[in-house]
Image (tube, rainbow, N blue to C red):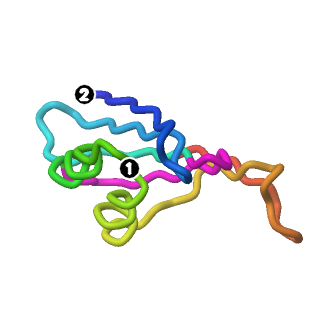
Amino acid sequence: MLIDIKSDESSSLKQIIYNRPINNITGQLIVVFKNNDVYKYEKVHLKDFLQLISNTVSIGAPFSNCIKNKYTGIKVYRNKNNKQQGENNENING
């Protein structure tokens, strides 16, 4: 099951993609931020994902509460136009 949600209301999140095999209770969550940085979260429980998308106003606060504070994110892409001084541009496939 693949769910792709674009977020125009959030000031920080641009898009979330949740990919979960039908027979699993957990899946992979990909988060694209407004600055185009991309993070991957593994083994995100379906109930946490549903809590994330249940807020009809914005997904920014629920993201912090349900995902960011509970799961370890891996940066898989850093927007080269947004890198800090001394950083290298990363594009990690995983």
Direction from residue 57 to residue 36 in the image, left or right: right
Q: Residue at x 54, y 41 (%)?
A: 14
Percent across and percent down for residue 20 are 25, 37
User: What amino acid type should be assigned to the residue bearing mark 1?
Assistant: Ile
Q: Position of residue 87 (x, y in %)?
A: 82, 66
In this view, the residue farthest toward the front is 57
> Element under label 2?
loop
Q: Which mark is residue 24?
A: none
Query: Type of residue at label 2?
Result: Met
Q: Is residue 27 above or below residue 84?
A: above
Residues in magenta? 33-45
Q: Closer to the camera, 65 or 39? A: 65
Counting residues from the start of the chain, the first of labels 2 and 1 encountered is: 2
The mark lying in front, picked from 2 and 1, is 1
Q: Quadrant of residue 2?
A: top left
As drawn, the label of residue 59 is: 1
Q: Main secondary structure of the magenta part?
A: strand
- Give the side of residue 57 with respect to residue 21, left or right: right
> CA gap, disc 2 to disc 1?
20 Å
**Residue under the image location 28 percent in, 51 percent down:** 52
Image quadrant of residue 43?
Answer: bottom left
Q: Is residue 27 magenta?
A: no
Circle 2 is placed at which residue position?
1
Which residue is the extreme one toward the right? 85
Q: Position of residue 13 (x, y in %)?
A: 51, 48
Q: In front here: 35 or 20?
A: 35
Residue 26 at x, y percent in the picture: 21, 48
